[in-house]
Image (cartoon, grey):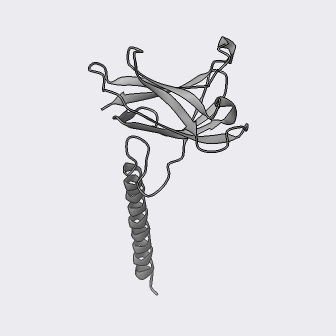
Amino acid sequence: MNHLTRVLLVILILFGGFWLWRDLEVEEVDEVEKVDEVGEEQGREVAPVEFISENGVVLRVTSPVRDAVITSPLTITGEAPGTWYFEASFPVVLVDWDGLIIAQGYATAQGEWTTDAFVPFVITLEFVKPSYGETGTLFLQKDNPSGLPENDDAVEVPIRFE
């Protein structure tokens, strides 16, 4: 094999490698674009996002993702420590940009909740889109049957209204 043939072979290999790398990059971008605005991906589960409360408790929220554009009805899913629940539920509140409550309800445990481990939860809230302001906040609150302020805790998930 002469020198020119070797150089051409190396160039072809480099060009082929670049082309393959470029196709993989485009494919990865296409996968990211398949994730819709509430965090659900077509064909696969989306990894939950961890939110840390003021008291340092971690909650994992699968849907909606941070700053997601939401519509009614809104299904909220994730995992919370069993200590977050009381009688297998905890309060969830949706507020508009001004802090006005537009929906509230109770997330329910989807498994045994008398544990310190993470327990899946789900809740569906129905609401009327605020007439003013595009942003809001979803509050996932630790159930506090004692009513004592030192037992209060919550995580905040910022959202946007469609």
Camera-side residue of 27 and 72? 72
Q: Quadrant of residue 104?
A: top left
Q: Residue furthest left?
A: 131
Q: Is residue 45 left or right of residue 72?
A: right
Task: Judge whether residue 139 can be spotted in this image.
Answer: no
Camera-side residue of 53 and 140? 140
Q: Residue furthest front?
A: 87
Q: Quadrant of the C terminus?
A: top left
- Rendered location of residue 66, percent (x, y): 46, 33
Q: How many marks?
A: 0
Q: Residue furthest top?
A: 149
Residue at x 40% of width, y 79% of height: 4
- Rendered location of residue 130, percent (x, y): 30, 22
Residue at x 36% of width, y 24% of height: 135
- Rendered location of residue 16, percent (x, y): 40, 70
Compared to residue 126, the image places residue 42 above or below, namely below
- Rendered location of residue 119, percent (x, y): 64, 41
Residue at x 62% of width, y 21% of height: 153
Residue at x 39% of width, y 52% of height: 29
Q: Is residue 68 left or right of residue 49?
A: left
